Image (spheres, rainbow, N blue to C red):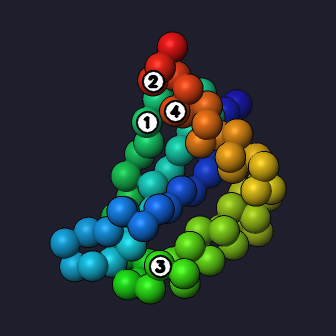
Amino acid sequence: MARKALYLDKSMVNDNGQHVPVIVVEGTDGYYPTDWEWGTDYAKARGLVDDYNTKTLRLSDIDVLEIVASSIRGQFI
């Protein structure tokens, strides 16, 4: 089963100025949008993403990087 992670960068903001994370699936090109609005403060929103990945999904920072890289790598192969 492919691992999943939440991802957020500073450009992921909706029309209301809310940061909106995406779901990345290991080995799958691209990402899946969410409709979760996690505030206008990037640092706080990023902290929520990190906490979710760590505490809920049980992923390390390296795991998340591997998952995100695998979704990008597929676009260039």
Q: In x, y percent, where is residue 12? A: 36, 63
Of the image marks 3 and 2, the number of the one nearer the N terminus: 3
Query: CB of mark 2 within 8 Å of CB of mark 1?
Result: yes
Amino acid type at mark 3: Tyr
- Assess disc 3: are there few (<14), some (14-19) or many (≥20) residues with their C-alpha within 10 Å of its C-alpha: some
Q: Which mark is residue 30?
A: 1
Q: Which residue is pictured at 70% across the width and 31% down the height?
A: 1
Q: Quarter-wise, where is residue 53 in the image?
A: bottom right
Please, is residue 4 above or below residue 14 in the view?
above
Query: CB of mark 2 within 8 Å of CB of mark 4?
Result: yes
Of the image marks 3 and 4, the number of the one nearer the N terminus: 3
Identify the residue position indicated by label 3 in the image.
42
Please, is residue 4 above or below residue 43 in the view?
above
Identify the residue position indicated by label 4 in the image.
72
SS at circle 4: helix
Of the image marks 1 and 4, the number of the one nearer the N terminus: 1
Amino acid type at mark 2: Gln
Q: Which residue is pictured at 51% across the width and 14% down the height?
A: 77
